[in-house]
Image (tube, grey):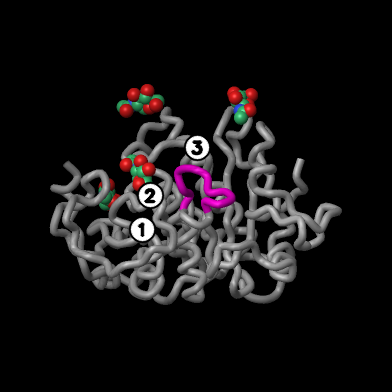
């Protein structure tokens, strides 16, 4: 009966009443540390809440801005946010709640009753200026429940939210995980649930990646314009259960033997996501670079810029 205790507010102005109160202890995050956190599974699933907590704990300044409902598979669809005609996901807000709102006691947890792309762009344009004091430095979308490889790029709302963010001028990455079920964030209190364990692990992997990308000594913007990232985590398993067990491999989304990729690992053809993720037990994470307008692979020149940014975390495919 969460709907009875959650009072949503349509204006987020209240959060500014005590500006000095949002002191972040033990900040390790890079200087670019304002994050909008989006997804397509909905604002109340375990994965996105675990990610919110992990980023906040690592010193990032985060606002969660995600759909009020499960919006999986909605790609880059867009609509105007509307008043809730059914309860929010897992009954986290009642019918009739405003089109956008935030948790009254944790005001940086917000929903938008529209598609994933809309929730991300509303977070950029409205929640971030009010709750973080400016536009965000970066948008994290996910981690999605379920992988998004190959053709999924066209249908994934996780990738749709990252694409819309990138097209709105904010660098963005979609994260997807080949594990688990869409479960409520209340599951996170059950530490023996594999969904909880996986959500916590993936959230730490995302923090590790952001710490590298956002603090990269390579010059230039966080990502080249016209490029977003599509990152896929393999399944959580006994072999792949700690952050250090994983390696990060540069990949491409679509098979194309006629195009040259950036030269790395002794080749000018990047492996496919499916090759890297299909190497069972290898704990390899695929990192693809794509054009947010058409979801196709980035050019070799764009790949080279990304490679320069994150080379310290990359490995060659096993
Ligand atoms: C979320 O939506 C997707 C796409 O419609 C569907 O496949 C999935 O089962 C839904 N998840 C839940 C928990 O209802
Ligand atoms: C709202 O925030 C409170 C306090 O952090 C928490 O107990 C509650 O579960 C949250 N509800 C939702 C739907 O986010
Ligand atoms: C916690 O998760 C475990 C593993 O999924 C499950 O067996 C158990 O029933 C859950 N406990 C509660 C209190 O839901
Ligand atoms: C991957 O390895 C695990 C553990 O060895 C095994 O249970 C699973 O069936 C394998 N999956 C595939 C797709 O080969």
Residue 184 seen in the current view: no
- Whether label 3 lies within 8 Å of ligand 4 gets the answer no
- Tell me if label 1 and label 2 are in contact, CB under 8 Å: yes
Q: Earlier in the sequence, mark 3 or mark 2?
A: 2
Residue 190 lies in the magenta stretch: no
- Tell me if label 3 and label 2 are in contact, CB under 8 Å: no
Residue 169, horizontal then vertical, whole percent = 51, 76
Q: Earlier in the sequence, mark 3 or mark 1?
A: 1
Between 228 and 100, the one lying in front of the other is 228
- Whether label 1 lies within 8 Å of ligand 2 gets the answer no
Q: What is the span of residues highlighted in magenta in the rendered image?
A: 142-152
Q: Mark 2 points at which residue?
A: 41
> Image quarter for residue 118?
bottom left
Q: Mark 3 points at which residue?
A: 179
Q: Which dot marks residue 243? A: none
Q: Name the residue under label 1.
A: 66
Residue 143 lies in the magenta stretch: yes
SS for dot 3: loop
SS for dot 1: strand
Q: Earlier in the sequence, mark 1 or mark 2?
A: 2
> Image quarter for residue 79?
bottom left
Q: Please give the name of the residue rendered at 55% of the width and 53% of the height, measured from the top-left corner.
A: 207
Q: In this view, does 92 lie to the left or right of 174?
A: left
Q: What's the distance in space between the residues labelled 3 and 1, CA to CA?
A: 20 Å
Residue 315 seen in the current view: yes
Q: What's the distance in space between the residues labelled 1 and 2, CA to CA?
A: 8 Å
């Amino acid at each position: 009966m969460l709907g009875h205790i959650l009072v949503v507010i349509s204006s987020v102005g209240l959060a500014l009443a005590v500006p000095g109160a949002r002191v972040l202890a033990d900040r390790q995050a890079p200087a670019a540390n304002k994050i909008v956190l989006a997804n397509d599974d909905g604002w109340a699933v375990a994965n996105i809440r675990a990610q919110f907590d992990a980023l906040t704990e690592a010193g990032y300044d985060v606002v969660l801005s995600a759909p009020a409902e499960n919006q999986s598979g909605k790609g880059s669809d867009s609509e105007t946010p509307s008043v809730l005609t059914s309860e929010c996901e897992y009954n986290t807000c009642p019918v009739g709640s405003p089109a956008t709102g935030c948790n009254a006691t944790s005001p940086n947890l917000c929903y938008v009753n529209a598609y994933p792309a809309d929730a991300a762009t509303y977070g950029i344009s409205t929640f971030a200026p009010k709750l973080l004091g400016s536009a965000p430095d970066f948008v994290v979308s996910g981690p999605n429940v379920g992988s998004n490889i190959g053709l999924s790029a066209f249908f994934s709302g996780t990738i749709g939210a990252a694409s819309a963010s990138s097209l709105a001028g904010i660098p963005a990455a979609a994260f997807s995980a080949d594990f688990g079920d869409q479960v409520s964030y209340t599951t996170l209190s059950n530490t023996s649930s594999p969904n909880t364990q996986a959500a916590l692990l993936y959230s730490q992997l995302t923090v590790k990646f952001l710490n590298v990308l956002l603090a990269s000594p390579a010059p230039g913007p966080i990502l080249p314009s016209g490029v977003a990232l599509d990152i896929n985590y393999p399944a959580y398993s006994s072999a792949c259960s700690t952050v250090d067990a994983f390696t990060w491999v540069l990949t491409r989304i679509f098979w194309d033997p006629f195009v040259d990729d950036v030269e790395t690992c002794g080749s000018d053809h990047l492996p496919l996501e499916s090759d890297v993720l299909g190497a069972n037990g290898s704990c390899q994470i695929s990192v693809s670079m794509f054009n947010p307008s058409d979801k196709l692979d980035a050019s070799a020149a764009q790949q080279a810029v990304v490679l320069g940014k994150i080379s310290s975390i990359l490995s060659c495919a096993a």
